[in-house]
Amino acid sequence: MIDVTDKTPTVREATAECCVVCSEPIMSALHNESVPKGDVLAVARIAGIQAIKHTPDLIPLAHRIGVHGAEVDLWLENDRVRIRATARTADRTGVEMEALTAVTVAALTVADMVKGVDRGFAIEHAVITHKAGGRSGEWTREDDK
């Protein structure tokens, strides 16, 4: 684990995205809100928020930091569920792992909830799209501009 004792706490933010590419039967069930396990987007949103809070329990060398803000949004696109999470802190280290953990756990939750409809899904493209704060300042993924 990196020693961050001497670092000054600063406001930091990270956003990540991911998607669950879904078959036509899954997308139909999502649009009709007929997935047997319930409200997929609401459950996945809560799972993502919980994941942000539990990141150091899942990633062995991640620092335990105070997460002061968490947003997880999911929406339906043509053939996929798009997931975006933003984590914020005022601490000594960044929240990139928290944002990535949120989108991937939310994606796994979507997969778990729709697998009874059809197993035709794939989790794809989990990436950091933006980060701000800390020593390296602001960064935005080039292909997302």
Image (cartoon, rainbow, N blue to C red):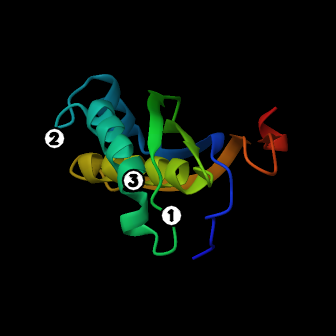
Circle 3 Cα neighbour tier, 10 Å, few/some/many (<14 / 14–19 / ≥20): many
- Of circles 1 and 2, which is in front? 1
Which residue is denoted by mark 2 in the rendering? 37
Determine the residue positioned at 51% across, 74% down.
61
Expressed as whole percent of the image width and height from the top left, the position of residue 68 reads 46, 36
Determine the residue positioned at 79% across, 44% down.
141
Q: CA distance from mark 3 to mark 2?
A: 17 Å
Amino acid identity at mark 3: Val
Circle 2 Cα neighbour tier, 10 Å, few/some/many (<14 / 14–19 / ≥20): few
Circle 1 Cα neighbour tier, 10 Å, few/some/many (<14 / 14–19 / ≥20): some
- Residue 46 relative to residue 132: left or right: left
Q: CA distance from mark 3 to mark 1?
A: 19 Å
- Of circles 3 and 1, which is in front? 1
Mark positioned earlier in the residue sequence (3 or 2): 2
**Are the residues at dot 3 and dot 2 in contact (C-beta closer than 8 Å)?**
no
Amino acid identity at mark 1: His
- Mark 3 lies on a secondary structure that is helix
Mark positioned earlier in the residue sequence (1 or 2): 2
**Are the residues at dot 1 and dot 2 in contact (C-beta closer than 8 Å)?**
no
Determine the residue positioned at 53% across, 30% down.
78
User: Where residue 63 is drawn, which disc sits there?
Assistant: 1
* Residue sitting nearer the eye, 122 or 145: 145
* Residue sitting nearer the eye, 107 or 89: 89
- Residue 18 relative to residue 25: left or right: right
Q: Residue furthest top?
A: 32
Which residue is denoted by mark 3 in the rendering? 105
From this view, report whether residue 107 is shown above or below residue 45.
below
- Mark 2 lies on a secondary structure that is loop
Q: CA distance from mark 1 to mark 2?
A: 34 Å
